[in-house]
Amino acid sequence: MEIAGIRSAQDLGAKAVSDGQEELGKNEFLELMIAQMNNQDPLDPAKNEDFIAQLAQFSTVEGIENMNKSMAGMASALQSSLSVQASSLVGRSVMVPTSQTVLGPDGITGSVEVPQATGNVTMEISTANGELVRNIDVGPRGEGAMRFGWDGRTDAGEQMPPGIYRVRAFSDVGGARQELTVNMPERVVSVSIGEKTLMANLAGGTSVAANQIKEIQ
């Protein structure tokens, strides 16, 4: 027998789908539970434990909806924070892991990350076209950051013009040559803001994630 005023589970499910929901929300869930209570068999009523379990499910559904709203708010706040970071980085010089940078009147400075003690560290500096202009033999180094500087002169002492240059560093550990991470200052010319990451676009033509920036100068 169909009771007027009480919607079936199929009706509630159809309404949820028509409203763009993939699952029943808390309102539909509550209506279903009330309909069950009103139409239970008086000779075999639902046990208290069953209703408690359903109430627990209802609380879970409501909690998930509230959590989703909170997460959406946090995502919006994070986006705003990224925008503020972006505006403060443009035009600044930052120290980042990069293999190339711009040679200015003061030369190039940076650091090399040496992961373990090595018998020898060598550095190679070349033009943007790959022409090698300087070899620097640093010698044995211990573990840690190694600062370096290049005045813009070639091995023959010739002053190179301003422009983009590539700097690479290598270590000799047990006779094996291993490339090391080089950090150099670069000017941020623009930023790209994604949903989760802020990318700094550098004057040398590369881009790095904001969390890779070592220093802001």
Image (cartoon, rainbow, N blue to C red):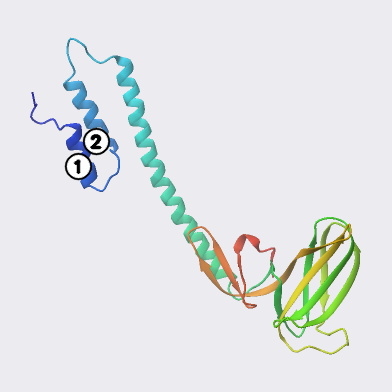
Of residues 6 and 155, the one drawn nearer to the viewer in this rendering? 155
Q: Which mark is residue 28?
A: 2
User: 10 Å neighbourhood of mark 1: few (<14), some, or many (≥20)?
Assistant: some
Amino acid residing under circle 1: Lys
The answer to which image quadrant residue 182 occupies is bottom right
**Where does the C terminus fall, quadrant-wise?**
bottom right
- Vertical relation: 211 (above or below) 157: above
Amino acid residing under circle 2: Glu
Residue name at image x 20 percent, y 37 percent: 12
Please name the residue that numbered disc 1 is placed on.
15
Q: CA distance from mark 1 to mark 2?
A: 9 Å
Pair 1/2: label in front: 1
> What kind of element bears circle 1?
helix
- Vertical relation: 141 (above or below) 71: below
168 sits left or right of 62 in the view: right
Q: Work out whether mark 1 precedes mark 2 in sequence or the reverse, and give the earlier one.
A: 1
Position of residue 115 measured from the top left corner of the image (x, y, whole percent): 80, 56
46 sits left or right of 62 in the view: left
Residue name at image x 23 percent, y 42 percent: 16
Position of residue 63 measured from the top left corner of the image (x, y, whole percent): 38, 36
> What kind of element bears circle 2?
helix
User: 10 Å neighbourhood of mark 2: few (<14), some, or many (≥20)?
Assistant: some
Position of residue 68 measured from the top left corner of the image (x, y, whole percent): 40, 45
Residue name at image x 26 percent, y 33 percent: 29
Position of residue 150 measured from the top left corner of the image (x, y, whole percent): 82, 78
Residue name at image x 8 percent, y 23 percent: 1
Q: Are marks 1 and 2 in contact (CB under 8 Å)?
A: yes
